Image (cartoon, rainbow, N blue to C red):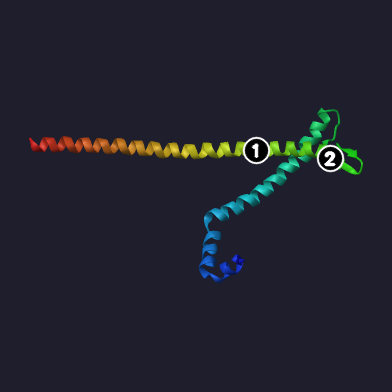
């Protein structure tokens, strides 16, 4: 069986390069890249919130336990389960923040859709009234 070099075949085909350019320049890809960058920055903010504000407060409430320092050692291996607990709390806070953010966005977009529906309903009612008036006028003219 002959082995094909797909990479060389793709580079030889100019239409593949133009297809790639179209793909990479689509709005969705750019929006995704912006989302990843903003998400990364948001993750840093939430991590700081967890590490610098919430975890010390939780440590005070729990009697001064510093979760990041919790670990145990088996032979030469150290298991940092405190960092794991901290990362779980970090994840939960990020998930809650994203949930709240998505709910806010949904409310905003739903209100915009409701306004559009109301405008369409008003237009339909107005058009029906115009139609009825035209029918009435046509009937009167035919008499």
- Of tags 1 and 2, which is closer to the observer? 2
**Residue positioned 20% across, 36% down in the render:** 133
Residue 82 vs residue 55, the one in the foreground = 82
Residue under circle 2?
80
* Residue sitting farthest toward the right: 75
Residue 21 vs residue 96, the one in the foreground = 21
Quarter of the image where one finds residue 42: top right
* Image disc number at residue 59: none
* Residue sitting farthest toward the front: 1
Residue under circle 1?
97
Residue 70 vs residue 16, the one in the foreground = 16
User: Which comes sooner in the sequence, label 1 or label 2?
Assistant: 2
Q: Residues within 10 Å of mark 2 (few under 14, many from 20)?
A: some
Q: Residues within 10 Å of mark 1 (few under 14, many from 20)?
A: some
Quarter occupied by the C terminus: top left
Q: Label 1, label 2: how many angstroms apart (C-alpha)?
A: 26 Å
Q: For residue 121, say whether it is visible.
A: yes
Q: Position of residue 50 (x, y in %)?
A: 75, 39
Quarter occupied by the N terminus: bottom right
Q: Is residue 106 left or right of 117 when viewed as pictured?
A: right
Q: Is residue 25 left or right of 96 when viewed as pictured?
A: left
């Amino acid at each position: 069986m002959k082995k094909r070099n797909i990479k060389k075949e793709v580079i030889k085909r100019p239409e593949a390069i133009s297809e790639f350019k179209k793909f990479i320049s689509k709005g969705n890809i750019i929006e995704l890249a912006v989302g990843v960058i903003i998400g990364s920055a948001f993750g840093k903010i939430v991590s700081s919130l967890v590490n610098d504000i919430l975890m010390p407060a939780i440590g005070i409430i729990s009697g001064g336990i510093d979760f990041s320092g919790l670990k145990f050692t088996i032979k030469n291996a150290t298991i940092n389960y405190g960092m794991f607990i901290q990362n779980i709390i970090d994840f939960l806070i990020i998930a809650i923040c994203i949930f709240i953010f998505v709910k806010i966005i949904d409310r905003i977009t739903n209100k915009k859709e409701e306004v559009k529906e109301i405008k369409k309903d008003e237009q339909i009612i107005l058009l029906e009234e115009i139609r009825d008036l035209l029918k009435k006028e046509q009937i009167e003219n035919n008499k």
